[in-house]
Amino acid sequence: MSDIKKIGILTGGGDCPGLNAVIRAVVFKASEYGWQVMGVRYGWKGMLNADAITLTKADVKDILPLGGTILKTSRTNPYKVDGGEAKVLENARKLNIDCLVAVGGEDTLGVANKLTKAGLKCVGVPKTIDNDLGATDYTFGYQTAVQIASDSMDRLHTTAKSHDRVLVCEIMGRHAGWMTVDAGTSASAHWIFTPEIKGSVGDCCKMLKERYARGDKYGIIAVAEGSEFSDLDVKAASQSTDAFGHVRLGGVAETLAKEIEKCTGIETRHVVLGHTQRGGSPLAYDRILATRLGYKAAEMIKDGQFAMMSSLRGERIDAVPIEEAVKALKTVPQQYYDAAKTFFG
Ligand code: F6P
């Protein structure tokens, strides 16, 4: 057993359903091992400011079904702050934190990996609605976000059909189309655009004209926020980037809807699901996955497996190097998209 007395836990990046389930699991398991737990507030910002609270089983016993994160979050990158790394290490000493559980996506975990090399032992838990982390079959929060997008598109079908309209639905996911392909398939969208494949707006319009000609006078188009097209230029909504250098995406559905209306002459409107996809209570699947991943993170600390991340592999939860998880974005393979394509039209 590693020589641990007190651990810290933080949640970084965009919030995601299931974060509280991880916090609860880590605190319960830590208490079994006799460790104290500090909840670091606002992700890495909390480590720069020594902003932490004590967490006991009594504090977390009822948080499993709650969305968001009781610890709050931020997109702060300590490596973009002058003397940031040294400050984090100093505050870890000040707070007597022997090891830190970082719950996050590629950005948060990338920092955890660097800090472990710098002397602060960290373990990771894979979080993101985008499902774009490597070395794990799924990240927690993903299934809930897909369900929200799928339910929303089910609703779009009935209203689009009533008005003979085309509705274009913009789905989050940054540069990975997992949510869009899965929610689009689940809600039987008539066309799906993803960032991985530069789709043709012209082909989509042809399909819509055919639908209307045969009497199916409505259309649902799922478009990932990071999509690019073979025959349409889309400008990013904003040139502003976060501390990890990511451009804020959004706006593609509006551009696409205008183009479809121009090309088909059919009334076409757009909907941006936005942060609705990150809000609310996690599905049972994500509660269970988050609990298992958090449980494993505590076990990894006990076993001295630092710079590692808990990961879903088939039915198992394993420890994998964080390095492996963050080295490349996990995107939708062509074969996966091709299967979804069968149902277009
Ligand atoms: O990474 C999760 C995510 O929800 C992306 O799908 C989206 O592009 C981004 O975060 C939005 O981030 P923010 O809430 O900081 O604008």
Image (cartoon, grey):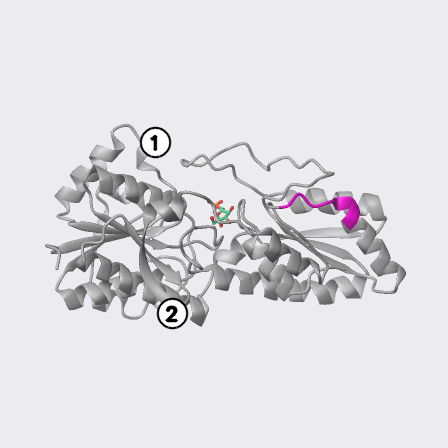
Residue 324, x across and y down, in percent: 37, 47
Q: Is residue 62 magenta?
A: no
Count of numbered badges drawn on the protein: 2
Q: What amino acid is labelled 1 in the image?
A: Lys
Whole-angstrom CA distance, mark 1 to mark 2, is: 35 Å
Name the side, left or right, on which 226 lies relative to 104.
right
Q: Is residue 155 above or below residue 307?
A: below
Please tell me which residue lies in front, 111 or 20.
111
Q: Residues within 10 Å of mark 1 (few under 14, many from 20)?
A: few
Q: Which residue is mark 2?
A: 288
Q: Which residues are magenta?
A: 197-203
Q: Residue furthest front?
A: 335
Furthest residue toward top:
82
Q: Position of residue 56 (x, y in %)?
A: 20, 64
Q: Amino acid at mark 2?
A: Ile
Q: Which residue is mark 1?
A: 80
- In the figure, residue 339 lies in which quadrant? bottom right
Q: Residue at x 18, y 54 (%)?
A: 304
For image coordinates 32% across by 41% down, the residue present is: 111
